[in-house]
Structures are given as structure tokens and as C-alpha cells.
Image (cartoon, helix red, strand yellow):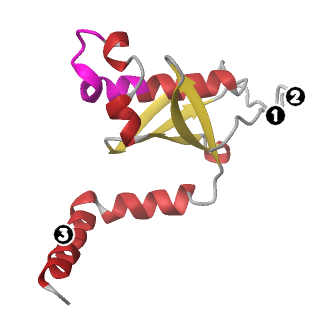
Amino acid sequence: MNRNTGILAVAAILAVGVSGCTGFSYLSKNYASVGAQVVTIGCNDPYTVYDQRRVSKMLVVSDGVREITGCGIDERYDGQGGPAATRAKRLREAARTFLDETARDYCKITGESVFTDLQTEFTYVCTPAPEARGLKVPRLSGR
């Protein structure tokens, strides 16, 4: 193993350790088997949503490249601190839009857990449940 490869290996191990293996383990366990759906906000800024309907939780993921080059982020949130400062607000907006577009506009977001800058889990409550209303929840397109 040459010196550069060794340095990269150590850097990768430290990155995993710092990023929180517990968070990765939780996300893998709870969302690995869930299909991705895409919701757009603003001027078609896409956010990937993994919806765990049986436990009323969803993971909303923003794309890192889109965070830098996103259409209209600076204009939409002018004076609010730029893309990094408005990320939480945009992730909340994506979660709300997802519920609205899947015919669950009566559902209420009750909590959120930030895993990384680009990944936030939202919990929600739907009263009554979509099934109780005889409503089939539509699926959005995936990636």
C-alpha cells in the first residue's frame, strides 16, 4: 500500500466515524427497502423522499450538487442567508409538498430529526388515516 492510499483509507475511516455510524445504521435499517419518490419545489428543485407510511415517517434528501447549482435558491430566499441557511426550510417545504401531492394534505408534520445537512427525517400524523377515508395514496415518480 503506498502512502497516498494509506492516507485516503485513514481519511475514509475518520469520515465514517465522524459522520455517525448510528445515523447510517438507522437510515439503512429503516429506509433501505423503501422506494424513492421525487417531489419538486420552487422552480423544479427535486428532493428525494423515502416514505415509511406504516410508521408515519419520511426521509427527505437533497442533492449536494443541486444545493450548489440549484435554480433560484438565492432569489427565492433572498436575504435569508443563502442555500446553507435555508436548507432546513426547503427540506420542510419538500416534506409538506410531498404529503400534499400524495393526497395527504390533512396530515400534520409533528417532528423532525436532522441526520446530515442533506438528510432530514420527518414524522407525521394523519387523522383519519388515508385508508379510513377510502383513499388510495398515489405514488410519485422515482429516480
Residue in the image at 54% along x and 22% along y: 44
| Helix, strand or loop at mark 1 | loop
Report the amino acid beneath label 3.
Ala
| Helix, strand or loop at mark 3 | helix
Q: Earlier in the sequence, mark 3 or mark 2?
A: 3
Position of 138 compared to 10: left or right?
right
Name above or below for residue 7 compared with residue 31: below
In the image, 54 versus 82, the foreground residue is 82
Q: How many marks?
A: 3
Whether tag 1 and tag 3 are in contact, CB under 8 A, the answer is no
Report the amino acid beneath label 1.
Glu
Residue in the image at 57% along x and 22% along y: 97
Residue under label 2: 134
Magenta highlight range: 78-90
Whether tag 2 and tag 1 are in contact, CB under 8 A, the answer is yes
Q: Is residue 87 shown in magenta? A: yes
- Neighbor class of circle 2 (other Cα within 10 Å; few <14, some 14-19, many 20+) is few
Position of 133 compared to 73: left or right?
right
Residue 26, how many percent across, how many down?
A: 45, 60
- Residue 11's tag is 3
Residue 39, how many percent across, how many down?
A: 59, 30
Residue in the image at 20% along x and 90% along y: 1
Residue under label 1: 131
Residue 15, how many percent across, how many down?
A: 23, 63
In the image, 100 versus 131, the foreground residue is 100
Whether tag 3 and tag 2 are in contact, CB under 8 A, the answer is no
Question: Chief secondary structure of the magenta span?
Answer: helix
Report the amino acid beneath label 2.
Gly
Q: CA distance from mark 2 to mark 1?
A: 5 Å
Q: Is residue 108 visible?
A: no
Position of 1 compared to 107: left or right?
left
Residue 101, how many percent across, how many down?
A: 67, 23
